[in-house]
Amino acid sequence: MQIKCVKLVYFSPTGNVRRTLRKIAAGTGWETVEYDLTSFDARWQKYMFSAEDLVLIGMPVYYGRIPAISEEFFRGIRAAENTPAVFVVSYGNRDYEGALLELKQKCEQKGFAGIAAAAFIGEHSCCPRVAAGRPDALDEEKALFFGREIRKKVADVADISMLKNLQVKGKYPYRKSKERPVCPVTADHCDSCGLCSRECPVSAINPADPKETDPFRCLICFRCIRNCPNGAKYIENDKFNNLIAELEKNCTVRKEPEIFI
């Protein structure tokens, strides 16, 4: 196959997916272009891909699924039939369940043909003490290795039709999407700078009053909590905080990336 460019397409509220995809792309050695679909506005644009592109598509895992904005994510994406693609999810050291399989299915519906896939680990978005500091140097080395293996696979075939259907691990039927009855609340020392509203990937925070968040729109991605310059955003919900405590207790054993190629 002739590949002219590697194109990264991702949703990455806390940066883990972006970092992983960049390392995979570096491993391939090809020229790279990025399309960051994390912002709400970016998901209203049109993105076209050809059979000469290798498209790396990445998303985080929330509750064993890809994010609930997947319809928005894929809305503006157009791919020529059998555009070669690599599917990547990043999860917080618990389990990615059906997320990788779900991402593969969504991409194939858009015309992409998977040549490889992987599940990498990143620092848990809601609980930084779980998988703290990941992706780390070992993860990055595995991402580079994955990129090199992708290039070898592409070099070994004349046409994508020669490749067998990519198989990935995943649980189906997918876990039912959970209602999200909680969302970040705002402390009194918020100075209404508006950064959280501008940076929210789903426009869930009222730009006129950043202390107001729509709990049905919010993904609990923790972008606003992590980025608030005054530390004024937090979760005030016993059930949710008990879940975080369970994660800290039960997800301490290091998991390693899983690669399918």
Image (spheres, rainbow, N blue to C red):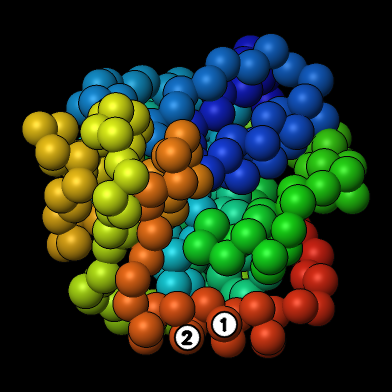
Q: Nearer the viewer, residue 231 or 246?
A: 231
Residue 251, image quadrant: bottom right
From this view, report whether residue 131 is shown above or below residue 13.
below
From this view, report whether residue 109 is shown above or below residue 240.
above
The residue pinned by badge 1 equals 245
The residue pinned by badge 2 equals 242
| Residue occupying the point 65% across, 78% down | 248
Q: Nearer the viewer, residue 52 or 95?
A: 95
Q: Secondary structure at mark 2?
A: helix
| Residue occupying the point 37% across, 52% down | 233
Identity, as a three-letter code, of the amino acid under mark 1 = Ala
- List x then y, in percent, for residue 156: 81, 35
Identity, as a three-letter code, of the amino acid under mark 2 = Asn
Judge left or right: residue 251 versus residue 231.
Answer: right
| Residue occupying the point 18% across, 62% down | 215
From this view, report whether residue 35 is shown above or below residue 71.
above
Residue pushed farthest left? 208
- List x then y, in percent, for residue 67: 37, 57
> Mark 2 Cα within 10 Å, few/some/many (few <14, many 20+)?
few
- List x then y, in percent, for residue 5: 62, 16
> Mark 1 Cα within 10 Å, few/some/many (few <14, many 20+)?
few
From this view, report whether residue 210 is shown above or below residue 133.
above
- List x then y, in percent, for residue 245: 57, 82
Q: Nearer the viewer, residue 48 or 144?
A: 144
Residue pushed farthest front? 189
Q: Secondary structure at mark 1?
A: helix
Q: Are marks 2 and 1 in contact (CB under 8 Å)?
A: yes
Residue 181, image quadrant: bottom left
Q: Nearer the viewer, residue 248 or 99?
A: 248
